[in-house]
Amino acid sequence: MSRRKHTSKFKTKVVLEALSERSTIQEPGRKYDIHPAQITNWKSQFLKNGEEVFPKKAKDAKTEAGEKEERLLKTIGQLKVENDFLKKASS
């Protein structure tokens, strides 16, 4: 008998059902024909690595506005330098 391979989508579905606590670990095990120990293993892996799902900090509006302002000031500075250079070159 060969080992079954389950997709991460399927594992997540089973783990979320197990985490919902509407039923015991045995019920999803019977439903999906998976040993409850395997579900417990997936559940612990899911909880341990759950922080990787949301890797970036959410940017607030002030940070985004500050970054946009910084980009605009940088562009203005670059254009001013180019304008001054062209004025000197044309004289």
Image (cartoon, helix red, strand yellow):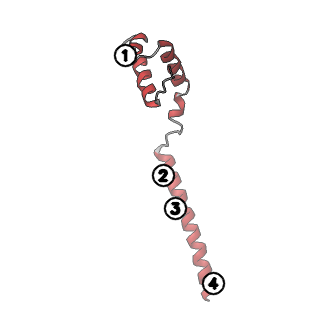
For residue 17, the mark is none
Residue at point 51%, 24% (across, down): 46
With respect to residue 6, does 55 lie above or below?
below
With respect to residue 70, does 43 lie above or below?
above
- Mark 4 lies on a secondary structure that is helix
CA gap, disc 3 and disc 4: 24 Å
Can you give x and y, in whole percent of width and height, for residue 30 in the image? 39, 13
- Mark 3 neighbour density, 10 Å: few (under 14) some (14–19) many (20 or more): few
Say what amino acid the circle numbered 3 marks. Leu
Q: Nearer the viewer, mark 2 or mark 1?
A: 1
Q: Which residue is mark 1?
A: 31
- Give residue 70's quadrant in the image: bottom right
Q: How many badges with numbers are in the image? A: 4
Can you give x and y, in whole percent of width and height, for residue 18 in the image? 42, 17
Q: Which residue is mark 3?
A: 72
Compare residues 53 and 8 and report the one nearer the observer.
8
- Mark 3 lies on a secondary structure that is helix
Q: Nearer the viewer, mark 3 or mark 1?
A: 1
Residue that lies at the very extreme toward the bottom in this rendered image: 91
- Mark 1 lies on a secondary structure that is helix
Mark before the other along the chain sequence, 2 or 3? 2
Mark before the other along the chain sequence, 3 or 1? 1
Compare residues 13 and 56 and report the one nearer the observer.
13
For residue 88, the mark is 4
Say what amino acid the circle numbered 2 marks. Ala
- Location of the C terminus by quadrant is bottom right
